[in-house]
Amino acid sequence: MSYDEVREVDEAVAAALEGERERQNDTLAMIASENHVSEAVLEAQGSELTNKYAEGYPGERYYGGCEFADEVETLAIERAKALWGAEHVNVQPHSGSSANLGVYLAVLEPGDKILSLDLTHGGHLSHGHQANFAGQLFDVEHYEVDAETGYLDYEGIREQAEEFEPDIVVSGFSAYPREVEWERIQAAADAVDAYHMADIAHITGLVAADVHSSPVGVADFVTGSTHKTIRAGRGGIIMCREEYADAVDSAVFPGAQGGPLMHNIAGKAVGFEEALQPEFEEYAEQVVENAEVLAETLQGHGFSLVSGGTDTHLVLADLRESHPDTTGGDAEEALEEVGIVLNANTVPGETRSAFNPSGIRAGTPCLTTRGFGPEEIEIVGDCIAKVVDNVGDEEVYAEVSETVDELCAEYPVYG
Ligand SMILES: Cc1ncc(COP(=O)(O)O)c(C=O)c1O
C-alpha cells in the first residue's frame, strides 16, 4: 500500500502510516494477541464498504442499497460456520469485548452474577473487571489458576460455582498457556444451571485449525476477536446454538451497536476464506510448535514459565525467581529497544502492580505469519534471554539489535 492518496491530503497521517508499516517490518511482534493480516484482508478493510449503512442483518436491513453488504456478511457467516462448526454466527461485534457485551446483554440482567478468571491470573477486562462495563453492571466473582501448577483448577471452579451460584460462567483467557478442558467448565456451569460463555479471542485460529480443542457445541456461547490467531482483521464474533440466535442478534443490534462495520466484515470474510485453506492448518500447527520451542529455549536460559510450558501460541514467564531485580516493565522496555515487542504481564500470585508486573507474555502468531520456524524462534528466544539477563547493557543491545535486523530483513511482512 503506497498511501499516496493519504499523503495528498495529510502528510502527517501518511508519515505515521508508513512509520507503522516500517515498524511492523523492522521489529519482531511478539504480543500474543496480535497478528499480521494479508494484503487481501487489508484491501477489503479499506474498501468502499466503510461508507455503507447496513443496520439489521442480511435480507432484513433498515437501509436500501444493501445487496453487496448482504453478500459479504452472508459469506463471512457461512465461512465462520465452516471454520468453527457453529449453528449460528453473528459477525457484527466491533471487537472481542463487544462480542462479550452482546452475550451478556442477550442473557443477563444488571446485577446478575458472573464467575470468571481473575485478570491477574490470565482473565480479561471484559470478564468482569471493576474498571470495565462488565464489572460495573454485574456482580462478579473470580476463580484463579492453581498457585502451584499454574493450571486451571476445574474442581475448584465447580466448588466456587456451587457456592456463588453464578448466572454465567466465563472461560477463555488472555494469558493462559495451556489447553482448556471446556467440558469440565461446562460441568461447573451445569451444576448450578448457569450459562457458559467460552471466550476464545486468542485461540480462534488454533480452534479453527483443530490444534486446540473446541468449545463450540459444548458452551452455550463462544465469542472471539477476529484479528488474533485467526488473522482476519480487527473485529469480534459470537457463535451459539440456534436457540439463542434471536437473543444474540438483537443484543448486538439494536442492543449494543448501530450500523455494522461492513468494511471490517469484508475483512473477516476474506480472512476466513484464507483460514479455510489447508495452509492455514499448517500455520496454526507451526504457531504452537514455535511457542513450544520458545518455551524450551527460555527455560534453557533459566526462565521460569507459568505452568512450566505451553500448549498454545503463548508463553508467560514469571521473572521473580530468575530475574528478581527485573520487572516485567523493565524487560518489556529493554526488549523494545532491540526491536522485540512484547508485553509485561501479571502472573498468578502477582506481588507487584498491574502497571509494572512480574511477568512477560510472548506469542508466536506474528512471527509464524512472517515465516519463522523453530530455528528462527530459537534465535529469538536466545535474544530475549540475552537482553533480559543484561538490562541496561548497551553493548548487548547493539549486538541483539543486529540479529533482530537480520531476521526482519530475511522475513519481511509487508512490501
Ligand atoms: C480473552 C479475551 N477476550 C476479549 C478480548 C478483547 O478483544 P478486543 O480487544 O477485540 O475487544 C481479549 C483481548 O486481547 C482477550 O484476550
Image: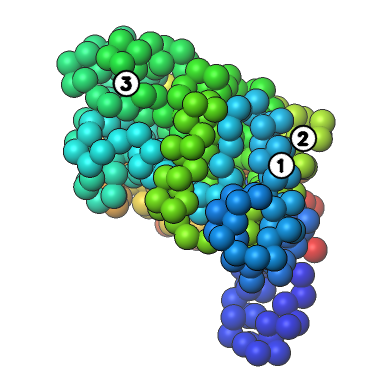
In which quadrant will I find the C terminus? Answer: bottom right
Marks 2/3: CA distance? 33 Å
- Picture mark count: 3
- Residue 203 against residue 182 in the figure, above or below: below
User: In this orientation, does residue 124 appear?
Assistant: no
- In this rendering, which labeled residue sits more in front, label 1 or label 3? 3
User: In this orientation, does residue 79 appear?
Assistant: yes
Residue 272's disc is: 1
The amino acid type of the residue labelled 3 equals Ala
Circle 2 sits in a helix, a strand or a loop, which is it?
loop
Q: Position of residue 222 (x, y in %)?
A: 50, 31
- In the picture of the structure, the residue carrying the numbered disc 2 is 276
The amino acid type of the residue labelled 2 equals Leu
Q: Residue at x 58, y 37 (%)?
A: 89
Circle 3 sits in a helix, a strand or a loop, which is it?
loop
In which quadrant will I find the N terminus? Answer: bottom right
Mark 1 or 3, nearer chain start: 3
Q: Residue at x 37, y 29 (%)?
A: 170
Q: Residues within 10 Å of mark 3 (few under 14, many from 20)?
A: many
Kindly indicate whether the residue at mark 1 contacts the one at mark 2 (C-beta within 8 angstroms).
Answer: yes
- Residue 219 against residue 359 in the figure, above or below: above
- In the picture of the structure, the residue carrying the numbered disc 3 is 194
Q: Residue at x 30, y 36 (%)?
A: 108
Q: Residues within 10 Å of mark 1 (few under 14, many from 20)?
A: many
Marks 1/3: CA distance? 31 Å
